[in-house]
Image (tube, rainbow, N blue to C red):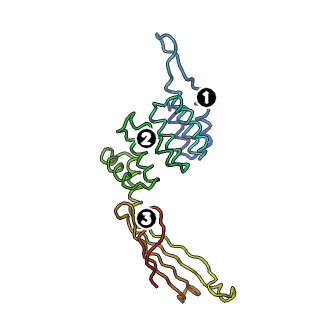
Amino acid sequence: MLDADDLYYALNESEQLDKAHQFAKNYSEQTPYQVGVYGLPGKEPNDDWMEGQTLLVQSLVALNDLPAAQKKLETLSSTAPANQNLRIALASVYLARDLPRKAEQELKAVESLAPRSLILERAQAETAMDLQEWRQMELLTDDVIARSPEDVPSQELERQRKVHNMYELRISSNRTLSSNSPVSGNKDYGVETLLYSPPIADNWRVLVAATTTMRNLKKVKASTVLCALVESGLHVMSGLRLK
């Protein structure tokens, strides 16, 4: 018989997101916070209740309802401040909402609970990447990969690092009016090419930028090349211009 996790993920992975959310919502509402245990007085916390709350949060994230997921996790975390996994999940939602400093603060607050937690280190590495703290990201990722090279989340983190450390090529084109006359200039096209090197000393990249204006995609009318050293992640151009 499938348990709640299996049923939820079956719906989620088949892209039935609304049904998965409704299932998680019903399960979280119908699962009691405490249950009686035979032979013991009173009631004990119900592990299934927390599972229901977690599935509900995951379903909200899957639907991209990040404000609702954040509100739910903040409520849960306030009632269980020593639950590291809950607060790591909250930090992940902060990160998804472009609040990396809040994510960093949340992770720092629970670091002492289990400082060698792989889930924590992966979250810290992703947050460092978002904050463009490249050296910290490299150290954390190295440790995660050394400890859990076969784990899928660790491999995904390594993939993100490899992408960051690659060359980056951007090409864009547009129609221009390079002459003073809209009639004579409406056959002009502009092409801009940006090539970034892999990071140098963590925080810098070499940039080569070229812009070209063409008539009828054949005759080159003008070309400019810019060479620069730019801060990694910011892509701010400054440097030597060559014509």
Residue 52, image quadrant:
top right
Q: Secondary structure at mark 1?
A: helix
Mark nearer the viewer, 1 or 2: 2
CA separation, marks 2 and 3? 26 Å
Q: Give the amino acid type for the residue marked by disc 1 in the picture.
A: Glu
Vertical side of 157 occupied by 7: above or below: above
Measured as percent of width and height from the top left, residue 84 is found at 44, 35
Question: In the depicted view, which residue is nearer to us: 71 or 14?
Answer: 71
Vertical side of 90 occupied by 234: above or below: below
Residue at 48% in and 40% down: 106
Q: Are marks 1 and 3 in contact (CB under 8 Å)?
A: no
Q: Is residue 14 left or right of residue 40?
A: right
> In the displayed image of the protein, which residue is found farthest to the front?
239
Q: Which mark is residue 68?
A: none
Q: Earlier in the sequence, mark 1 or mark 2?
A: 1
Vertical side of 169 occupied by 122: above or below: above
CA separation, marks 1 and 2? 32 Å
Q: Secondary structure at mark 3?
A: strand
Q: Which mark is residue 231?
A: 3
Mark nearer the viewer, 1 or 3: 3
Task: Report if residue 54 is visible in the image.
Answer: yes
Task: Report if residue 16 is visible in the image.
Answer: no
Q: Earlier in the sequence, mark 1 or mark 3?
A: 1
Q: Label 1 neighbourhood size at 10 Å, few (<14), some (14-19), many (20+)?
A: some
Q: Are marks 2 and 3 in contact (CB under 8 Å)?
A: no
Vertical side of 27 occupied by 19: above or below: below
Q: Give the amino acid type for the residue marked by disc 3 in the picture.
A: Glu
Measured as percent of width and height from the top left, residue 137 is found at 38, 52
Residue at 47% in and 66% down: 235
Q: Which mark is residue 29?
A: 1
Q: Which residue is mark 2?
A: 108
CA separation, marks 1 and 3? 49 Å
